[in-house]
Image (tube, helix red, strand yellow):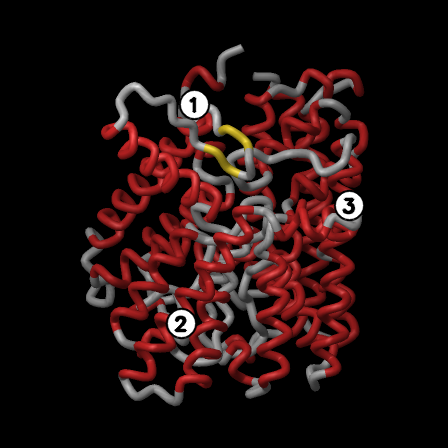
Amino acid sequence: MKKQIVLRVLSFISLIVSLSMIFPLIWAAVDGSPDLIAFILALGSGLLISGVLFLLSRVRRKDYEKLGLREAFAVVTFSWLIASTVGALPYVLSDFIPSYTDAFFESVSGFTTTGATILADIEAVPRALLFWRALTHWLGGMGIIVLGLAVMPFLGVGGMELYKAEVPGPTPEKITPRIQQTAVFLWGIYVALTLIQTVLLMSGGMDFFDAITHSFSSMATGGFSPKNASIGHYRSSYIEWVTAFFMFISSMNFSLHYLVLTGHFRKALRDEELRGYVKMVLLSALLIACFLVLDGFGDFFSSLWQALYHVLSVVTSTGFFTTDYAQWPPVTQFILLLLTAVGACAGSTAGGIKVVRVLIMGRQIRAEVTSLLHPSAVIQTRFNKKVISRKALSSITAFFMLYIGVTVCCTLVVTAFDHPKLDILTSLSAVLASLSNVGPGLGAVGPVENFSWLPAGVKWICSLCMLAGRLELFAMALLFLPSAWNR
């Protein structure tokens, strides 16, 4: 592995994260907040880390072209680690979250767009820190590496390896011929949609601060809100509709946005993953609504909207809420737990296994069952009119097994802490919510609860699950192979 290249790229990632602190620093200055000093110190510390990494690496411009898959996976994994480490500094230095374990948890939750929090009273937190929380969501949503590719053209050919290693989904593809153009386009769409949502939320009565922070969170499908009651604080159907719409479009594959903008609207609508995703959302919402009506939670139409909003919130891995769905009937909570694992579309800001993998796995199972009836038949698994290769099918199967294995092992370890609140539902949902980057879970980590009471060891496990989920498991697992470090 070419460690010099890895260190050099990490220095630029640290620089990007550090310079991003200028925005909350300005907010702290405008508010006259004492957190101004904390952000100045955090900014300086981040720049120092960036400088040290830069000096430790000796890289020529042409060396970036030698960046291979090993280096790409290492860069992506360590980029998220260093971003989370640097991102935790404002929390610690402000003394608002004095424990580094808690600060790191909050930072990882932000950058991985998970939205789990250790803050019990969010509205008591200074606005500069709340802005930083939301900004970490926004930076992590589209991807730190994708942002780096947009502003670091010198990565050249090696940038494609970084793009493949970070973008979620079984087969990430370039949208435009050049990888830098793809990165610039993705971030351009991301910024434009964020601004549009901010304006729409302000039109619904939100002030600028609430509008921009909620826009950051929903575009990144993260879920951090400056209000304790999340979207439920506003009691506004308009705000619920706006956030639901942007949660949905953010959970679509961003290549479909490109098709729509280039006039290929029908082609985008023919996408099998999008169709499967919409069907899953509507069917789940309808089922939950029926159970809510049967249990006396309201009339059908109000129950349907509540169900649809929270299905979207969970399946997109956002985590906004308008009511405590942990109080809903057990069967509805089970449906939400399944949706937590499935997630939304590949190539989006959402977490989870991804709909495309579930659909392909379902078709492969059907093909295997059919082959039992017709042993001599050659049955191919297709998706979007393309034959899925054996290698891709093997990769998807391995991902499912790894996802299940990590979930079971981490849940087992969490329950072993023997905390009175860590029942099996709370333990499982905490791990799943972290691994799928959803945030709120069920039980004692439900939507109106928080993660502050968890033992320190469990917080570190959840933090690692958040990172593993955001990196889709393989990138982090690869670093545990000795062969990945050999030349």
What amino acid type is highlighted by mark number 1?
Arg
Say left or right for 440 vs 50. left
Are the two marked residues, 1 and 3, in contact with CB atoms closer than 8 angstroms?
no
The tag earlier along the polypeptide, 2 or 3, is 3
Q: Nearer the viewer, mark 1 or mark 3?
A: 1
Residue ID at (80%, 37%):
181
In the picture of the structure, the residue carrying the numbered disc 3 is 185
Are the two marked residues, 1 and 2, in contact with CB atoms closer than 8 angstroms?
no
Q: Nearer the viewer, mark 2 or mark 3?
A: 2
x, y percent for residue 454: 33, 62
The tag earlier along the polypeptide, 1 or 2, is 2
Residue ID at (36%, 72%):
288
Using the image, tell me which numbered label, if any, was put on residue 286: 2
Other residues around mark 2 within 10 Å, as few (<14) / some (14–19) / many (≥20): some
Using the image, tell me which numbered label, if any, was put on residue 390: 1
Looking at the rendered structure, the secondary structure element under dot 2 is helix
Say left or right for 109 vs 128. left
- Check the image and report above or below for 389 versus 202: above
Q: Quadrant of residue 95?
A: bottom right
